[in-house]
Amino acid sequence: MTRMEESMTRTVMISGASRGIGAAIAQRMQAAGWNVSLGLRRPETAGPDTPQRLACRYDALEPDSERAWIRATIARFGRLDGLVLSAGIHSRATVLEAADEEFDQLIAVNVKSPMRLARLAWPHLEALPDGKPHPGRIVLMSSLSGKRVKSAGSGLYGISKFALMGLAQGLRQCGRDNRVRTTAICPSFVATDMAAGVVQDMSELTRPEDIAAIVETVLGLPPTASVADIPVHWSVEDCY
């Protein structure tokens, strides 16, 4: 692939791409012909870069790594069409048990870093380097815990995901005129390491590949389709 061909190929940045949902999304988008820029705490574990894939260091607690990741992506591929914010941490603490430090870390990783990355990516999502309008898309990996709190043990985590849903809505409004669209994906438990130890039988859970298929569909939609959020459950519960 030539440099010109690379600059014409759609590019997506994916945080938390080392495993689970993020890794499945990266594999799916690369197979679909997109350039993928992976944000990883340990990029050396991703293997050598390829013409279609770039691995960069990203730590949600280090804002400098966010800026460096954006710069490296644009320098490498010349454009940005999608930003998938998949990195996050979990908690099983109730709102009565949680220490301030755990709450602060949840908000820092699950909300503040996605907000900073969206701000940094925004100019690239709305215009190509030549200044032509270029409406891209942002996908935030939220949770059904951002739409309802189903147990005491999901309370603290739910606070962070409710805040992430607020961020998604705020970004949607910011994109009203320039048509940069934002969608929150809201799964229940997915068959990843995060679910292990919480769900006894993981055989029927939604697979990371299922979420990746949904994300590919969202990223491929035209700006005339604005989708606020997509709830996903492996079974049927009262509301979702």
Image (cartoon, helix red, strand yellow):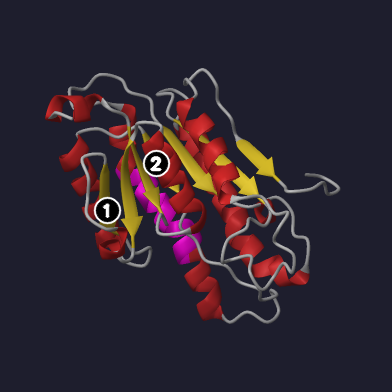
**Which residue is pictured at 86% across the width and 48% down the height?**
238
Answer with left or right where residue 94 lies relative to residue 130: right
In this view, the residue in front, 135 or 21, is 21
Which region of the structure is painted magenta?
108-120
In this view, the residue in front, 62 or 186, is 186
Task: Tell me residue 11's x, y (percent).
Answer: 31, 35
Q: Quadrant of residue 145?
A: bottom right
* Residue 117 sits inside the magenta stretch: yes
Q: Residues within 10 Å of mark 2 (few under 14, many from 20)?
A: many
Q: Is residue 134 above or below residue 30?
A: above
Total number of numbered discs in the rendering: 2
For the C terminus, the quadrant is top right
Disc number placed over residue 177 in the picture, else none: none
Residue assigned mark 1: 55
* Residue 152 sits inside the magenta stretch: no
Task: Tell me residue 35's x, y (percent).
Answer: 30, 37
Disc number placed over residue 83 in the picture, else none: 2
2 or 1: mark nearer the eye: 1
The secondary element bearing badge 2 is classed as strand
Q: Residue furthest left?
A: 3
Sequence-wise first label, 2 or 1: 1
